[in-house]
Image: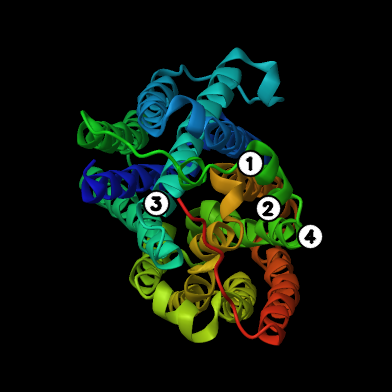
Amino acid sequence: MNRNRLFIASCVALVTTSMVFSIRGDVLDALGNDFQLNKEQLGQLLSPAFLGFTLSILIGGSLVDLFGMRRLLTISGLFYVAAILAIVVAPFPDGPISSIFGNPITILLWFAMLTLGLAQGLVEGVINPLCSTLYPEDKTHRMNVLHAWWPGGLIVGGLLAYVITKIMGLDGSVSEATATLGWRVKLLTIPLVAVAYLFIIKGQSFPVTERVSAGVSNRAMLMDLLRPSFICLWICMWLTSATELGPDQWVPSLITNLTGMQGILILVYTAGIMFVLRFFGGPLAHAFSPFGLMTISAALAAAGLYALGSATTMFGAFAAATLFGVGKTYFWPTMLGVTSELFPKGGPVALALMGGTGNLAIAFVLPIMGGWYENHGAQAAFQNVAVLPMVLIVFFGLFFLHFWRKGGYKPETLES
């Protein structure tokens, strides 16, 4: 087993997953034009991607010990290729769509988005327990380093989309055929990266999970997941993921309409902040404790989201995006790291429940944000979501006080 190679493969797989977010966000308006969908319908079309993400994480995380990590990671790569090809070759409707499920073309798109979500979820369902198994002595830090490649993929996808836009002149006046070719070319960059991580894992042996290595029974695993502290953390995951990833899918469209600038650049900028800062997640979590760090993050995210909704200039948009980018940086990886450290008997199922819950929350918030955008304007779409991190300040603050009274945050360990 080559530990470094498996970790690199996990990073590339996560890059593929996040490229989907940035590129899909960039082509969202073009898809709406070609398939004659309004903003609320686009939100409905995005939802199955997150539902598939949720379902796949839950199933994949539960089946990791049964089917093996390599097999599930291979399936994810094949799903990426199939889903993107289905979207690219889908024909266009003859007129406006009255219902997503009332037209065979949009039904095809719905299932393609679902398959895309399944691919993303299988990646998350495998790489999180793989990372905690490869580095049992340094989980929170390694989770942050691994998930630095989430914003890394956002940057790669965002810059690719921006370069293609400039080369093809898609930000100016172009023919309908050129505009259509543009979003198709952007989407086709995704399966290329998926094939890359399939090549990296070829011939590699994968370890058994930490739970299996320690001989933890299914009953002991279930009891770990029924602890009140796990349930409270599970509730927090609903709010953190909706705060972090819900707005990301609307950032390019919203910022473009708010300021007239290319919104994808804002997404790349905030992703750059996250990419750099996540490499310092371990030391910061040690200095402030994981829950102290996330309390600070929630306060910054709330301020950034509210400010994004008020932005009318390029400077204001970048300043607000900076606050939001810093605030959302440590949510996802630190939540997974804390889950793995405090509930090691839960194994991949605990991590799957967290990741699946996070993506289910996004599936709910996307069409809601689309409705706010359509009916009340861009300002409401951001500022209403700012309420979620304000609630998180209370939750994480209570967790911080709980561990402070016990003498400080300490991970639990399992003996092999």
Q: Residues within 10 Å of mark 2 (few under 14, many from 20)?
A: many
Q: CA distance from mark 3 to mark 1?
A: 32 Å
Nearer the N terminus, badge 2 or badge 4? 4
Identify the residue at image location x=63%, y=62%: 240
Location of mark 3 (residue): 131
Q: Which mark is residue 369?
A: 2
Could you tell me how far apart the alpha carbons at marks 4 and 1 are, in whole angstroms? 34 Å
Q: Mark 1: which amino acid?
A: Gly
Residue type, label 4: Pro
The kind of residue on which mark 3 rests is Cys
Q: Please state which of residues 232 and 346 is positioned toward the viewer in this rendering.
A: 346
**Pointer 2 and pointer 1: residues touching (CB < 8 Å)?**
yes
Please name the residue that numbered disc 1 is placed on: 43
Are circles 4 and 3 on residues that touch, CB within 8 Å?
no
Q: Which residue reaches farthest right?
A: 228
Q: Earlier in the sequence, mark 4 or mark 1?
A: 1
Disc 2 and disc 1: Cα gap in Å?
8 Å
Q: Nearer the viewer, mark 4 or mark 1?
A: 4
